Amino acid sequence: MSGATSTMDPALLAVLANRFDAIVREMTNTLLRTGRSTVMSVARDFSCAIVTADDQLLSSAEALPVHVFGTHLQTAAMRRMHPDFAEGDAFLDNDPYIGNTHHADHTILVPVFIDGEHVFTAAAKAHQADTGNSIPSTYHPLAKDIYEEGALCFSMTQIQRDHTDIDDVIRMCRRRIRVPDQWYGDYLAMLGAARIAERRLKEAAARYGVDTLRQFVGEWLDYSERRMRAAIAKLPAATVEGEGAHDPFGPLTEGVPVKIKVTVDPAAETIEVDLRDNIDCVPAGINQSEACAINNAITGVLNVVGSGVPVNSGTFRRIGVQLRENCVVGIPLHPTCCSMATTNLADRIINITQHAFSELGDGYGLAQGGAVTGAGFSVVAGQDPRTGGGYINQLIVGTNGGPATPRTDGWVTYNAPCGAGLVYRDSIELNELKYPVMFRYLRIATDSGGAGRRRGAVSTTVEFGPREAPMTAAFNIDGHERPARGARGGGDGSVGVAYLIGTDGTRTRTEPMAQLELRPGERLYGEHGGGGGYGPPIEREPDRVLHDYLEGYISRAAAEDVYGVVFTGDPGDDTLAVDEEATRARRAAR
C-alpha cells in the first residue's frame, strides 16, 4: 500500500492511463472483428488485459469481470512454470487449477520484452465454441470430475516460440475439437490481439521511455488504491451476511447453499469478503475455480462501491477475499470439475455479495440480477446440410434482467451478473446465416422484472429449432426455483424455464439442466430471469409506471395492483394518463 500522492504530471498520468486502455480496446476490436465463432465475433464473450511483470492487473478496459480480475494468477503461473521464457514466446492456458477460470476459456499470454527485459504480459482470453468436452457443449454440469468432463487441458502450454506456432499443440487441438477450423480461426484472433498489444506497448516505451512507463505503473496503481480507499471510507462500519443457494439439479437434490460474510471497515478503508463457511466441492461441474471465486467476490463489491474507481490491482489491494481449499466456492483441488465456474454459482456469489450491502440501509447495495443460462444460452451442435460439415456454437440470444439500484432501474440487455452487461446479445440473423437454426421470435417478457421504487429489468423469451437436420441443444438453468431477489422492499424477478415443443405443438417442460436432440419441426422455448427491484413499488413515480406499461415492461394489472397506479383513458387513442387523485387514494389505502 502506498499513501503517497503522485509525483508524475497529472496530465501525463491521464494520457498514459488512456494509452494503456486504448491498447486493450484495440485488442478487443481485433478479436471482435477477426473471431470465427459468433460467441466471439458477435456476442463478444472474451476479454483482454495488460498485466505487469510482477503480476499486477494494469488495464482491462471493457473486459468481463469474471474473466480478468484473477489474471495475475495466470501470469504468476507462466513465470513459475516457464522461468526461461523469452521474447517471441506465447502460451496457451485454460487450466482452472493454476489460475484460469474454466476449461472453456482459452487464454493466450504473450510476455512483452522492452530492451531485453520482461515488462508486461498481454493476455487475451476467449470463451470457445468447443474445447473437446465429452458432450457437445463447453459446459458439463453433471460431470463428476475433469475426466468425465473431457475437455483438453492446456496447463500453461507453450504454443509459440520465436513468434512461430508449435505445431504439436495445434495438431492436438485439431484432433480433439469438433470444428477445428473454427477453433483455429479463434486462436489466430486471440494471438493477433496479444501480438498487437506487444507492438503497441513497445511503441509506447519508445515514445515515453521505459522508466516513465514504470513510474506510471506505480503511480497509477497507487492512485487507484487511493480512490478505492476514499470510496470505502464513506460507508458505515458493519459486518453483513448474505445467503442464497443454487437450485437443485441432477444428484444435488437440495441444491448448493452459499453463505457470504462481508466486513466493511471504513477506518482501515478495507472490505473483506469471506467465502470459507461453505460446503466442500461437489461431484458436479458447478464448482468455482480460484480465479472465479476471486473475480466474482470482487465484482459484487465493485458493483456497489466501485463507481468511478479504476479497475486494477491498485483498487484490489483494499478488497480481501478469504477462500479455503476444496470448497465449492473456493479453491478446487484436481480433479474437481469446474466446467461451469463462470456461470451459475459465479452469478450467485455476485448477487449475494451486492445484495448483502443493502442491509447497510436504504441507498446501499443492489438488488440481484437475473442469472438464468437457459434456452437462449444453449450450445447448439450438429451437421449442417448446407455444407455437409459439423458445427457447434454457444448462442447468446436471450438476456436476463439487470438488478435495480438505489438510483436506477435495471438494465434490459444485462445478459447475466458475470458478464456485467458487457457480453453482447447475438444477432439472430447472423446465427441463422452461419448455422442451420431458425428462430421464431425473441420477445420481452412482460412483468418479469421485480417491482420496486426502482424496477428490475425484464427478461426475454425465445423460441428456436433446427432447419432441416437434427440439432442438439445443451443449457443449464439455475434460477428455476430461486429467482433474483429484490432489495429494501423490492420484488423478486421471474424464474427461468424451458419447454420442448413437439411437431404437434405439445409443450413438455424440460429438466433445468439438459441436453436435448431437436428434430426438424421441434422447437425449444425458454424464459430467462428478471432482475430484482429496489425499494417499495408504491414509491415509484406514477409517470414512470405509465411509461413502463406503454413499453410493455409491466401489465396494466401490475400497474394497478402492485404499483397502486390508476389510469384513465385509452392507449389506443393516446388518451391514456395517470389518474392522480385515484392513485393517491389507492396508495394511501395501502
Image: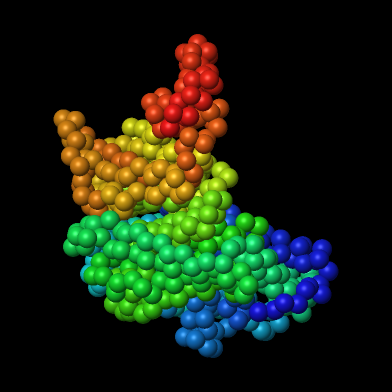
Q: Residue furthest front?
A: 589
Q: What is the count of numbered marks? A: 0
Residue at 32% x, 59% y is: 245
Q: Can residue 516 be seen in this view?
A: yes
Q: Where is residue 16 in the image (x, y as percent from the top left)?
A: 74, 66
* Above or below, 434 relative to 582: below
Figure quadrant of the N terminus: bottom right
Foreground residue, 354 or 282?
354
Relative horizontal placement of residue 313, taking residue 404 as reference (left or right)? right
Q: Residue furthest top?
A: 573
Foreground residue, 73 or 317?
317
Q: Quadrant of residue 544?
A: top right
* Above or below, 135 relative to 100: above
Q: Where is residue 34 in the image (x, y as percent from the top left)?
A: 52, 54
Relative horizontal placement of residue 335, taking residue 565 as reference (left or right)? left
Q: Is residue 93 visible?
A: no
Figure quadrant of the C terminus: top left
Foreground residue, 547 or 40?
547
Foreground residue, 107 or 452?
452
Q: Position of residue 267 (x, y in %)?
A: 63, 72
Residue at 64% x, 66% y is: 233
Q: Position of residue 27 (x, y in %)?
A: 59, 60
**Colouring:** rainbow
* Above or below, 295 relative to 452: below
Residue at 24% x, 57% y is: 248
